[in-house]
Amino acid sequence: MRRGFTLVEVLIALGLLATIATMAFMAIASSVQAQQVLEQEDATNQAARVAMRTLYRDISMAYLTPNTTATMTYRTLFTGQNGDPDRVWLASLSHHRKLRDSRECDQTEVTLWTEDDPNTPGAYVLLRREAPRIDQEPEKDGKILPLAYRVKLFNLRYLNPETAEWVEEWDSTGADQPNLLPRAVQVVLTLLAPDPDDPELLSERSYTATIPLLYSKPLAKQAMSTQ
């Protein structure tokens, strides 16, 4: 005579199945959460690479026209303002012409600055303004697009080619650096990304670059000899 399961055995089996199902669910949830963190980390790194590549192109190809006293001409400048975060205005040869036969060249006006990030309290959006035609108002007109979100820090320093010293501000229209480009610009960009240990928290990821300016004066020999 075949004997069936008792009620106790059925309850024990159901308990084991529930335990196994709970453990499997927790393992899957943990795996999905880890994948989401890695995807967000990769997205942060990709955003930083794109932003730094754009910054490198704009800054490395900055230029100043020597015709500062000519009439009926355009105005170029390189002005870096120290703040929290920083901002910079410059004329560059980094413009890409997107339409064939359009009346544009490689000259462009660029402004880089930050504004509050509407989606992340305490963070900023790094913005880029580009005007494909240089005029007498280098701070106006052009198209504004975001370069990076969740920006915690955007800091710039400038290498003076005449003194070989790093300074926090630059002004090619002033008396200290008259129509002079920095020899290089040091960029520090810090973004916020989900913390791998606690995705509910945000941790900082910093990216740095030292960008030489192609059209800047070389370092003065007397400045180099004093280092």
Image (spheres, helix red, strand yellow):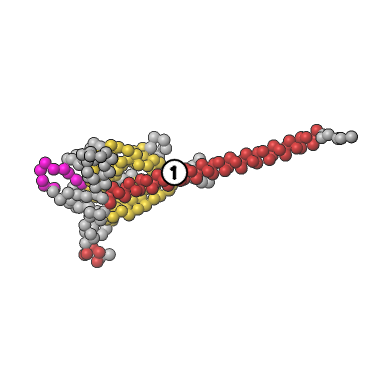
| Residue 35 locus on image (x, y percent) | 53, 43
Name the element at disc 1. Answer: helix
**Amino acid carrying mark 1 in the image:** Ala
From the viewer's perspective, tell me whether residue 33 is left or right of residue 53: right
Residue matched to label 1: 43
Residue lying at the far right in this picture: please name it.
Answer: 1
Picture residue at 24% right of the left edge, 66% below the top: 225
Pick out the residue farthest to the top. 7
| The magenta stretch spans residue 69 | yes
Q: Quadrant of the C terminus?
A: bottom left
Q: Which residues are magenta?
A: 68-77
Image quadrant of residue 11? top right
Q: Nearer the viewer, residue 35 or 89?
A: 35
In the image, is residue 153 part of the stretch drawn in magenta? Answer: no
Residue 180 picture location, percent across and down: 20, 52
Res. 89 in view: no
Query: Looking at the image, which is closer to me, 142 or 78?
Result: 142
